Structures are given as C-alpha cells and as structure tokens.
Amino acid sequence: MIPVPTALDEQAVAAMAAGRLARLRATMVDDSIDLLVLHNPVSLRYAVEYRGYNTFQAHIPTAYLLLPVEGPVVMHGAYAVDVALVDEARPANAVTGFDSGLDQADVARRFAADVVAVLDEVGLGTGARVGVERLLPTAHHALTDAGIHAVDAEGTIELARSCKSDLEMVALGHAIDVAEHGMAVMEAALVPGMTENGLWSLIHQVNVAHDGDWFDGRMLCSGPRTNPWYQEAGPRIIEGGDLVAFDTDMIGPFGYCADISRTFLCRGIDGPGWPTDAQRRLYDMARHEVEHNTALLRVGASFRELSAATWRQPDDVLVNRYACAFHGVGMSDEYPKIPYPDDWERCGYDGEVTDGLVLSVESYVGPDGGAEGVKLEQMVQVIADGVVPLSTYPLWDEEA
C-alpha cells in the first residue's frame, strides 16, 4: 500500500490546536460561560489535542478537562501526560460505575470539589456559569449542591466546531484523501465470494496505517441487505451483480471525519459486468438528489428553506429516506442536521448557513419493498463564492 503523504507537520498541528482552543474560549465568552467541564473524547481532542483511549473514554468517561475562559487548563485522569495545551494533570474522581462502583454519591461530591477548586484558583468562585457535557444526574446534582451554576455546554462546543480554520480544512482534506484511498482499495479488492466484513476491514487497515482513529459505524452492506438502509457489515458473502453500499463515517488522521458514501457494483464471473436497468434507475435518482440539493447551498440560506427546497423523492422511496438531507462534518458528524420537509415539524430547527460551513449532502434511494438500494454522500464546503467539493471519488463507474 502506497501511503498518502501527511498534510501537516508537528508545528502546524500545534498551531491548529491552539487556534481551536482560542476559538472555543471566544465562544465561551459569547455564551457567558466561565468554565467548561469536558468529557466527550471529540471535545477533548478539539479543545487541547488530547488523544488518549478515545473509544474507552466515549463509554466510560474517566478523564475530564476543566477549561476556564482565562487561566490554567487542568485535566483530571489523563492517560496521555504530554499534552502541550494542558497546564496541569491531576487524578480523577470519575463518576462512573466502572471507576467508583454502584453508589456514586460520594465520588460525585469529590468531582464537584475538583470543579470548585479550579474555580477558586482562577478567582471565579461558585457563582460562575459552568458549562458541562455528558454528566450523569448524580454528578450534576453534586455540582448544584456545591453552589455551582451548571449550564448545558453542547451548543457552545458545537458552534465553535462549526467554524473551521484553514489548517483544519487541510487536516480534513487529508482525512478525506485517506478515506478515498481506502475506498479505492476496497473497490479494487471487491470480487464475488468475499464477505462484507472482509471488504469493510480493508478501509480500517488503511485508516490505522495513516494514524487515523476509529469508525462511527460499520455501514457496509450488499445485495438485498442494501434495502432498507442501516444494515451494518456482516458475514454475508457478496455475489456477482450485487450492489455494495457503504458510508465511511471514518474518524481519520488528525481526528477529522471523512463521511462519504458510495455504492459499488460487484462484477465477476458469476454475475454481469454492468449494472441492471433497475440498478441504474436507483443510482440516477440518488445522483440527481445529491446534485439538486448541492445546488441549493449558499451562504445565508436558512435551514428551513433548504429543507423545503430539497428534491422530492418518489413516494415509494420517501418511505425509506435517509435521516437527513444535510449535516455538518468536522471531527465527527456535527451541527447542523437539516431534515427532509416531511420530518421538519418533528426534528427540524432553523439556523443559517455560514461562510465556510462544511456539510455532507446525503441521499439514500431504496424503494419500499425493493430488491436493492443506493447510498451516495458528498462532502462540500459552502463559501461566499459558491460550493467547494471536498470528496472527489467518482459517484459511480460511468463506464459500467
């Protein structure tokens, strides 16, 4: 395997991380938050470039970062100790069943004391507004009992992450390059007789070889398992003539997400070397949807108007529509999520496309009761001059 050349040296990564921290602190000021308590591994990497035991941290949040708007950054329970943007490492009082047993009231009080200590050290006191994420009720109650004014920090973090620096766009582009290299490896290896799991493992190997992190799912399926969507890779043996659809959901190099979907055709001696008319019709609809919806994007457009103007799928396809028409991408899927008009009243929220916003444009076309489905997804950046494609892997083998 020929590696994809790295895009950023250590100095550039350090500058990128420092810029993210400054943006997060500026957003804290805008939202009147004096201190953040962060647990989410994506937030930890975004704030201070902490990369330690990420998937473990996602379900057992042992480590937590205390980030004041001004003053030293303190991290409790860090597995990595050489984090340049962390000023002091301290032991953790982690409010989890794994760390503290089934009765967590006492450790929650010690956790709250950790927060109070940092507030006192930076001269804020317990009257400060403290933004928190991913806390159990026991921990939240302990903060309140300690006199801390705890508020939800998720909106602050998401808003900061939605604005990307030039260095972040380089890092994101590199993650996409690595993902597309993995996609090419998968497409070249795709032959009848291999399993979905075997094919999906190839892009994992490419990601790890390029210092990437993890995948948010196992979204690859073949043949009849492509309809409906959300059937993850399994032991099914791929047959000649099958469609093979996937969604990368790859947290790659530098912690950035490559979220790209394509649908391949498995050629081989036991199947045709070209798609059927039915498969082409599915693909043509999916490609048209991506192209139509991409053309809607512009700086200043409201989420509501984008939703209302999306391409109207045929009724039998609409039944199995994807979860949204557009969504943000950065270090993972992120704000905003813009649903189809049929889902607006249930889960839509308004907002505005800002200059530089990175989005995935989604399409899934799988008729209700149909034999197969096609999944396509393009990453783009919306700027004042228009829409910049970020994922460039061909939507389809046009020679098929």
Image (tube, grey):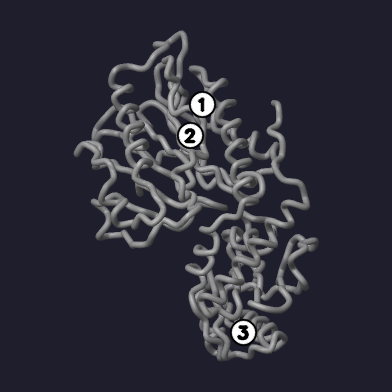
Label 2, secondary structure: give it. Answer: loop
Sequence-first tag of 3 and 2: 3
Query: For the residues marked 3 and 1, what is the alpha-carbon distance in whole angstroms?
Result: 50 Å
**Which residue is label 2 attached to?**
234
Q: Quadrant of the N terminus?
A: top right
Quadrant in the rendering for residue 67: bottom right
Q: Is residue 284 above or below residue 76?
A: above
Mark 3: amino acid? Arg
Q: Tell me if label 1 and label 2 are in contact, CB under 8 Å.
A: yes
Looking at the image, which residue sits at the far left? 315
Tell me where residue 280 sits by quadrant: top left
Disc 1 on helix, strand or loop? loop
- Percent across and percent down for residue 202 are 60, 31
Position of residue 328 in the picture relative to residue 132 (left or right): left
Residue 158 sits above or below residue 282 on the image = below
| Earlier residue among tags 3 and 1 | 3
Which residue: 26% across, 30% down? 370
N-term mark: 1 or 2: 1
Q: CA distance from mark 1 to mark 2?
A: 7 Å
The amino acid type, in three-letter code, at marker 1 is Thr
At a point 41% along the width and 43% down the height, the residue shown is 361
Amino acid type of the residue that numbered disc 2 sits on in the rendered structure: Gly
- Quick one: 160 or 237, which is closer to the camera? 160
Under circle 3, the secondary element is helix
What number is the disc on residue 109? 3
Q: Residue at x 72, y 74 (%)?
A: 74
Percent x, y for residue 306?
31, 51
Residue with the mark numbered 1: 195
